[in-house]
Image (tube, helix red, strand yellow):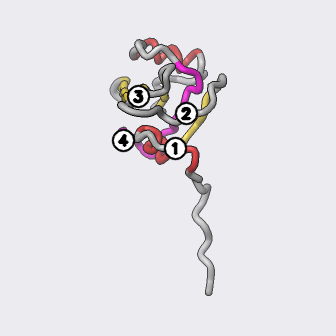
């Protein structure tokens, strides 16, 4: 599991990328496709063409980290193949990395108010 600091934003690239790319190639994807700074401290996720492989690029303050995971069975649940970027929560990231359907989770903006009985 990837541990990320509180306040770290997670961005998914909705288009598949060449999974042979490393630090420099994925950094270029962040700049050119996602219009973001790979050194911002946010986490950027990329998928392979088949959908069973993902890579994450993350600046931890001292250097770029590159994480990869390939599922032995099945595919990661990914948004439609459209241009653009999707932002997700750290909890949704955890579900995605485990191969679960993270789209079915509702992330409340604030906790519900207690009711007086």
Can you tell which mark lies on residue 78?
2
Compare marks 2 and 3 and give the one earlier in the sequence: 3
Regarding mark 4 in the picture, which secondary structure is present there? loop
Residue ID at (57%, 24%): 36
Where in the figure is residue 62, as x and y percent of width and height?
Answer: 33, 27
Compare marks 1 and 4 and give the one earlier in the sequence: 4
* Residue, disc 4: 3
Of tags 3 and 1, the one toward the viewer is 1
* Residue, disc 1: 101
Q: CA distance from mark 2 to mark 3?
A: 23 Å
Residue ID at (56%, 26%): 13
Quadrant where the N terminus is found in the figure: top left
Contact check, label 4 and label 2, Cβ < 8 Å: no
Numbered-mark total: 4
Q: CA distance from mark 3 to mark 1?
A: 26 Å
Compare marks 4 and 2 and give the one earlier in the sequence: 4
Please, is residue 12 above or below residue 3 in the view? above
Q: Residues within 10 Å of mark 3 (few under 14, many from 20)?
A: some
Contact check, label 1 and label 4, Cβ < 8 Å: no
Where in the figure is residue 85, as x and y percent of width and height?
Answer: 61, 29
Can you tell which mark lies on residue 110?
none
Can you tell which mark lies on residue 59?
3
Q: CA distance from mark 1 to mark 4?
A: 20 Å
Regarding mark 2 in the picture, which secondary structure is present there? loop
Magenta region, residue range:
1-16
Q: Is residue 57 magenta?
A: no
Residue ID at (42%, 13%): 21
Where in the figure is residue 111, as x and y percent of width and height?
Answer: 58, 64
Q: Can you name the residue that lies furthest to the bottom here?
A: 117
Where in the figure is residue 114, as x and y percent of width and height?
Answer: 59, 75
């Amino acid at each position: 599991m990837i541990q990320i600091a509180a306040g770290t934003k997670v961005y998914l690239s909705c288009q598949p990328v060449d999974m042979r790319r490393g630090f420099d190639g994925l950094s270029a994807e962040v700049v050119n496709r996602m219009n973001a700074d790979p050194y911002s401290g946010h986490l950027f996720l990329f998928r392979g063409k088949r959908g069973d492989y993902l890579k994450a690029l993350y600046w931890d303050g001292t250097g770029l980290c590159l994480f990869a995971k390939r599922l032995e069975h099945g595919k990661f649940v990914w948004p439609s193949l459209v241009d653009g970027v999707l932002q997700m929560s750290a909890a949704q990231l955890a579900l995605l990395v485990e191969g679960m359907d993270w789209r079915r989770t509702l992330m409340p903006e604030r906790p519900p108010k207690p009711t007086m009985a």
